[in-house]
Amino acid sequence: MPCSFSYSMKDVALFVSRMEALGKAGLGSMAAEGCRRELDRTYMRLALKLARVGMGWTHPNPRVGAVAVRDGVILGVGAHLEFGGPHAEGALISAATTPDGLRGATLYVTLEPCAHEGKVAACAPAIVKAGISRVVAAMEDPDPLVQGRGFSVLREAGLQVDVGVMERAARILNAPFLWRHLRKRAFVTLKVAASLDGRIAAADGSSRWITHRRAREWVHCWRASCDAVLIGRGTFEADRPSLTARPSADPLKRWRARLMRDAGRTTGGDLGGGPWPHQPVRIVLDSRARMAQKEELLSVMQERRGGPWIVACGARAPGASRERLRRAGIRSWVLPEPHGGAGVDLQALTAGLAEEGMLDLLVEGGATLATELMRQNLVDRFRIFVSPLLLGGERSWAGELGCGSLAEGRKLIGLWTRRVGPDVLLQALSPDADSLLRGQLQRAGEGS
């Protein structure tokens, strides 16, 4: 499964016993410190896995998980499950049932605890009140309302605060949240399914299915965890895709059950979010809203299953077409048009998504949309499935990018590969996104 997780208490027990043995043997502090760091990583891995339970439901808030530990015993876990719901730290503190509560415990949390009042109470003061003695955080929160303030509250109260444990993993998990604050737009992932020679369709236009069903299962998991899926009008007319998330099984079921148990619930559905799987908003780029004139296309969009549809059009789209969409229950989103009036301003689209809390965008369109996004440096992450198939022809997934030589080619960073059934998944980041995930980017507007 593409989104499966495992966690073994054997690892925790091993590290605890190792530390105890080091203490009894009177070995040097460096060895003991090394074991403590490894133990911190073990608990942080659990916190990161718990944070994934809320994927699809938390934005524009971040995905956060928390674990409380004392003397090698996990006292409680928590996760932020939906926007407006309890934060991970608050959920954990509320569910604590041990006689001494959380006094003297270490709290592992994937993001800096907040120190301001919002939809819920501030977490940092609650951590202090709970008597927690040490906080281990993966990363600082880039939100100006929080940035550094949560850690200051904790340190001023006398708590030990350690930051940076598994930071890159935490930044990857919250890349869309970081991108909103650092680049003021949605984080864009381009998904491609191509033959070995880079074709996304055969000469007759057929493209179902280039990849194996196991690769498609991964895509359904990605849809279930993102906020919106984007395609162009040509792709919609050719394929009539439903763009729904239809994974065969909930990869986070075990963790949802654990959170329910720790909260004292033995029956009922999820603690928050909504029905599984989460369904993304479905967006079609149609600069003149021409699809509004085709009844068969509107009927596809009016099916009840799945998330809501949005037709993103330009300012010159006829008012009658937009009214027809409205009567059909489909939202039209009027965006600026680029200089020259061709198409829709994609920068404005991604910025508008971030403003509306849709931070994680999955692009599944054809070569025209993919090429334009790449030309404007708006693709942050590439996920390309390659099938052991040769098709030939001209239907490549990338068009003209303006690269006249090898030196002008678009270089990607951090290539990662994995075999998925008979196919191979290639993943890579833009240089800008790679810097983001390494913590090397400045806030938008800062510096040179």
Image (spheres, rainbow, N blue to C red):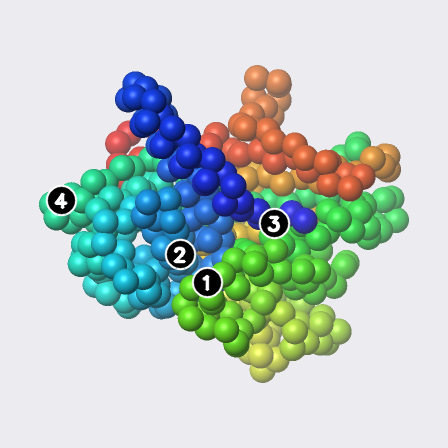
Q: Secondary structure at mark 4?
A: loop
Q: Amino acid at mark 2?
A: Val
Foreground residue among 383 and 378: 383
User: In 3D space, how far apart are the residues under numbered discs 2 and 1 (Cα atoms)?
Assistant: 7 Å
User: In 3D space, how far apart are the residues under numbered discs 4 and 1 (Cα atoms)?
Assistant: 29 Å
- From the image, tell me which residue sits under label 2: 77
Between disc 1 and disc 3, the foreground one is 1
- From the image, tell me which residue sits under label 1: 259
User: In 3D space, how far apart are the residues under numbered discs 4 and 3 (Cα atoms)?
Assistant: 39 Å
Q: Secondary structure at mark 3?
A: loop
User: In 3D space, how far apart are the residues under numbered discs 2 and 3 (Cα atoms)?
Assistant: 20 Å
Vertical position of residue 9 compared to residue 17: above or below? below
Task: Left or right? Give the position of 397 relative to 403.
Answer: right
- Mark 2, Cα crowd under 10 Å, few <14 / some 14-19 / many 20+, is many
- Mark 3, Cα crowd under 10 Å, few <14 / some 14-19 / many 20+, is few
Whether the residues at callouts 2 and 1 have beta carbons within 8 Å, the answer is yes
Does label 4 or label 2 sit earlier along the sequence? Answer: 2
Q: Secondary structure at mark 2?
A: strand
User: In 3D space, how far apart are the residues under numbered discs 1 and 3 (Cα atoms)?
Assistant: 18 Å
Image location (x, y in percent) of residue 32: 33, 26
Q: Which numbered marker is on residue 158?
A: 4
Q: Which numbered marker is on residue 3?
A: 3
Q: Amino acid at mark 3?
A: Cys
View extreme (front): residue: 24
Q: Amino acid at mark 4?
A: Gly
Task: Left or right? Give the position of 425 relative to 129.
Answer: right
Q: Secondary structure at mark 1?
A: helix
Q: Which numbered marker is on residue 23?
A: none
